[in-house]
Image (cartoon, helix red, strand yellow):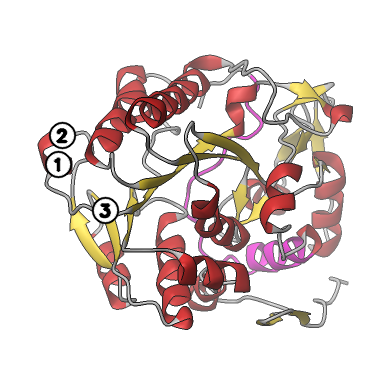
Amino acid sequence: MKKSAPQAKRRPGLRPLPARITTVAPLEDLLSEPTPGAIEAMRALDGDLILLGVAGKMGPTLARMARRACDSAGATRRIIGVSRFTSPADEAALRAHGIETIRCDLLDEAAVAALPDVPNVISMAGMKFGATGNEPLTWAMNVHLPAIVCRKFRNSRIVAFSTGNVYGLSPVPRGGSVESDAPAPVGEYATSCLGRERMFEHFSRTLGIPVVLLRLNYAVELRYGVLADLARKIRDGERVDLAMGHFNCIWQGDANAMTLQAFALADTPARVLNMTGLATLSVRETCATLASLMNTTVKFTGTESATALLNNPAKLHALIGAPRVPVSQILEWVSDWTLRGRPTLGKPTHFEARDGRF
């Protein structure tokens, strides 16, 4: 028999976590629910906020959280989302939640120069999936684009997304790479991401821009992420590769809240911080839990390697607090969502790749 969902849990200052999430609307509502820390961050922030690359996986709920946090804080502020918006529905959904939108190709320097001068910038634009075979565009998006952004927003404060892939593989028992570790990226994607960081660091120094670089591993929700990938494979009877036998993850709603709180941490020279959950998770053990929740079995292939892409987020947690949603709760939600055949974003993470090819 499938295990029953847990009773709703209470979080300080927030509504109880639901025992089950059955449709997209309450999922996105939960992902965009501002934490007390996010509300206080938006209360303390001066000026408007612009999100570059807002139409990606995290952008829409992050923009909504910023809007809701500002409203809760009584802060009158424009929240502006910038993207090419290849899907008109995505743009309309943002506008319906009080977010202004601007269509813009961020590689078009003249178009970026015409964007409003906003004192607070979240830079989310970049390229990962499809990077292999399209390396020139990958480098343009991940390395050239930050230079365009920094020259335009030289008088702003910038929170920029990066990735733990810049560290390369680290021994599992160590508990993850820390910010002082020397980067050792594997593959062109990860190397271009290190290039992105170097560009933000360069302009932070030369133009005096306060910057914080968030090395994220991995944001998850029910339609996307490592846990959703594993649950789908288990449901469909596919074998799970154990070569990348360990990983970190963080509930996307918590990552959204931490991103808003990160404005207070921006500095010159640029500051680097890891963002993920504290636990080092075993693929084997996580799959066993998911299979039990889904009343099925899991099949594996390969064996665990001694190294993995792992981040240690202790520094960020000490500054702004730990994630609120535990992995155990996410596993309950993901297993139920997957069994019900609810929608996915159709974007596998390929987290198991050890050669840096995405």
Q: Mark 2 = which residue?
A: 109
Residue 144 lies in quadrant: top left
Q: Mark 1 = which residue?
A: 113
Front-most of 213 and 243?
213
Horizontal side of residue 69 vs 330, given as left or right: left
The kind of residue on which mark 1 rests is: Ala
The kind of residue on which mark 2 rests is: Glu
In the rendering, at what x and y percent does residue 4 appear?
84, 77
* Residue shown at 50% from the left, 45% from the top: 266
* Residue shown at 49% from the left, 31% from the top: 269
* Dot placed on the residue nearer the N-terminal end, 3 or 1: 3
Kindly state the secondary structure of the residue where label 3 is placed.
strand
* Dot placed on the residue nearer the N-terminal end, 3 or 2: 3
Disc 3 packing (10 Å; few <14; some 14–19; many ≥20): many
Whether residue 195 is visible: yes
Front-most of 72 and 249?
72
Horizontal side of residue 311 vs 255, given as left or right: right
In the rendering, at what x and y percent does residue 340 appear?
63, 69
Q: Which residues are magenta?
A: 329-354
Front-most of 70 and 267?
267
Task: Reply above or below: 99 against 172.
Answer: below
- Are the residues at dot 2 and dot 1 in contact (C-beta closer than 8 Å)? yes
Q: Mark 3 = which residue?
A: 82
Front-most of 115 and 229?
115
Disc 2 packing (10 Å; few <14; some 14–19; many ≥20): some
* Residue 256 counted in the magenta span: no
